[in-house]
Image: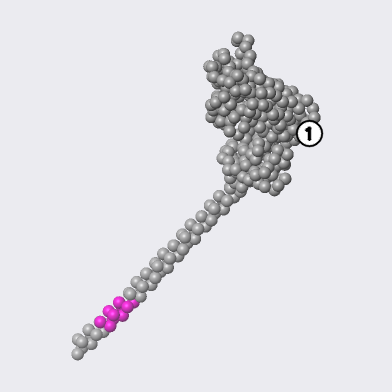
Amino acid sequence: MTINLSLRQKFRKLLTNSKGFSSVIGTTFMVLVMMFLGTSVFMWTLSQNTLYNEAVRTRNQEEADRVNEGVVALGGNYSVSGEDVTVLAILKNAGSVAAQLVNLWVLDTNQSKYTNKLVNLNMNPGDSKSVVYTVFIPETGANHTFASWFVTARGNTVPLERELGESVLVAQVAQGIGYLAMDFDKFKYYEYASDYGLKDFPTGSGGYSVPTAEQVVFGLRLTNYDPSGGKRSLTLNSHSLIWMYFPTIGKQVNWHIVNVDANGTIQPTYSAITLAYQETTTVYFASKSDGSFSGANDKVKPGSGGPAAINLLLLGTIGSDEYGQNIPFVSVYCS
């Protein structure tokens, strides 16, 4: 009886001690869980705070770059050919950060029509670039007024102010001092596909290297800038011609102005060509005769090899006044 009682007391004591030990373990485990959860929450909060601060710094830097972006349009002008509007501008990055121009918008204020063109022009600080872009605006005209602006990748706009005729761009003046200026990149020659038809029209071939023995036609783009400020139309008469001179042998060859239709066919009789103010027109020179073209008898070829100077001798009227201009514009090599 005494032994049983003693065993019960020991068992109860052991059971009591076990329950106390389990409580300690449970409490410790709970504390560890709470510490783990607390640490996890703290680390997550810290990481989110770091991400937020990084985002704020990035946004502040982007805003600072946007504010410091300083692309400006030093000058600009427009020329119109049909419903194509060509925008000429000199851009300079006067800011302290590199800039990327991504879009050009052009507005025809006369009819409230606008269009845009995607561009990709990167400019480092201090860069200055001359740019030319052409956009299509339905029913536009050379006598319309335009406004345009570039948009940068950071969202800044660069307005382009239209210059008056008396302040024509330096690049345009270099193309030909006077009323008409020539686009050097569009100077071409054409061979014949028939007595009156041009081969590879309107693409043609680069005009600076010309075949000596082939009968050719020259084509070039002219723009009327009328620097007087009167915005007058200019008309070319049949006496206008291209004059090629070979200095080593003292020989000259002439091509008179002609009309060429949209299919590349030369017309037998010349009709005066008129360019409105700031209008760009492609003009062709093909005939041996003044004012007419009779096919095979009026075709012209250089006939000699070597370097040659080419002058444009242009005659007609501007407004109600007589007009004459000599543009010593290119040299070619005949081979």
Q: Is 76 above or below relative to 290?
A: below
Density class for disc 1 (Cα within 10 Å; few <14, some 14-19, many ≥20) is few
Residue 250, quarter of the rendered image: top right
In the image, what residue type sits under mark 1? Gly
Residue 197 magenta: no
Residue 36, quarter of the rendered image: bottom left
| Most frequent secondary structure within the magenta stretch | helix
Q: Helix, strand, or loop for circle 1?
A: loop
Q: Is 136 above or below relative to 53?
A: above
Residue at (56%, 30%) from the top-left corner?
201
Tell me: 232 left or right of 86: right
Pick whichever, 303 or 136, lies toward us. 303
The x, y position of residue 140, in whole percent, is: 68, 42
Q: Is 304 above or below relative to 127?
A: above
Residue 71, quarter of the rendered image: top right
Residue 296 in view, yes or no: yes
Residue 241 in view, yes or no: no
Residue 19 magenta: yes
Pick whichever, 305 or 261, lies toward us. 261
Residue indicated by mark 1: 230
Residue at (53%, 29%) from the top-left corner?
200
The x, y position of residue 284, in whole percent, is: 63, 27
The x, y position of residue 72, in whole percent, is: 67, 39
Pick whichever, 250 or 292, lies toward us. 292
Quarter of the image with the N terminus in it? bottom left
Span colored in magenta: 11-20
